[in-house]
Amino acid sequence: MIYTGSHLSASKGYLSMGKKALELGENTFAFFTRNPRGGKARKIEQQDVDALLKLENENGFGKLVAHAPYTMNLCSGKENVAAFSANMLRDDMQRMEFTPGNYYNFHPGSHVGQGAEKGIEMIADALNDAMFEGQQTIVLLETMSGKGSEVGRNFQELREIIDRVNIKDKIGVCFDTCHVWDGGYDIVNHLDDVLTEFDKVIGLDRLCAVHFNDSKNDLGARKDRHEKLGEGKIGLEALRRVALHPVLQDKPFILETPNDDAGYAAEIKLMNSWF
Ligand code: FE
Ligand code: FE
Ligand code: ZN
């Protein structure tokens, strides 16, 4: 871990997020590309973007980890939802190029009874439709807890999506500690085994970013409820081992813990104290 950040509000634009990140002691951050519940996108001001890029440069920021809205479900059984989602993805791919070379993370989707196989197919089709030759953004599939009919509940399902994606050098995975734990991967007692499994099924070269969260639930609960570092069922010792693990060293670690600014600043400070 070298790059640490948290999820920040995008409501005041790019430069404002960069300043907030600095204020909290961060050198990367996450943000929603558009309204997470609705999907409306704000206009991108080139000046604002340029000011952020300058701030990032001057302060040695790592890659940012943008997050797609929650309303995006590329494998919805409802045709209008799937189409709306595919449109958002296409638009987000274009918008991300304003801040070139960063990560764009999204929840693969929920197949809502159509079956994982069908879901995987729809997700890959939407990706192939939206991604384009020469894009500088790397798209990340997030590891999911398997709540409801979520696709991406295990490494195998993510692998099957990746296998179908055409532009192979622009697709990766974001490893969410809360989600993998809730999904049944024991990162508390068998972290090495979990990462070995990831390597076998997907390949560690595709593990690009970490969502760093504790969990309110037990191993395999398939619930997805984040907790503050050290206050959940994963616990501080295990999280520390994740942060210090050799194969995860140069990745951005993004907090999505239930915190206010002061809480995030304290967790960033704690993470940095481990090095
Ligand atoms: Fe997420
Ligand atoms: Fe996450
Ligand atoms: Zn989550």
Image (cartoon, rainbow, N blue to C red):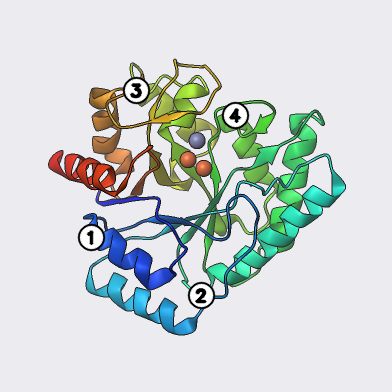
Mark 1 sits near ligand 2, with its Cβ under 8 Å away: no
Question: In what quadrant of the picture does the N terminus appear?
Answer: top left
Residue 41 x, y percent position in the rendering: 61, 66
Question: In what quadrant of the picture does the C terminus appear?
Answer: top left
Tag of residue 98: 2
Tell me the element at label 3. Answer: loop
* Amino acid type, mark 2: Phe
Residue 53 x, y percent position in the rendering: 36, 75
Instruction: Give above or below for 71 relative to 41.
Output: above
Q: Residue at x 46, y 71 (%)?
A: 99
Q: Which residue is mark 1?
A: 23
Distance of label 2 from label 3 (alpha carbons): 37 Å
> What is the crowding at mark 4: few (fewer than 14 residues within 10 Å), some, or many (at least 20)?
many
- Camera-near label (2 vs 3) is 3
* Amino acid type, mark 4: Arg
Distance of label 2 from label 1 (alpha carbons): 24 Å
Q: Do tag 4 and tag 3 residues touch (Cβ < 8 Å)? A: no
Tell me the element at label 2. Answer: loop
* Amino acid type, mark 3: Gly
Q: Nearer the viewer, residue 88 or 37?
A: 37
Q: Earlier in the sequence, mark 4 or mark 3?
A: 4
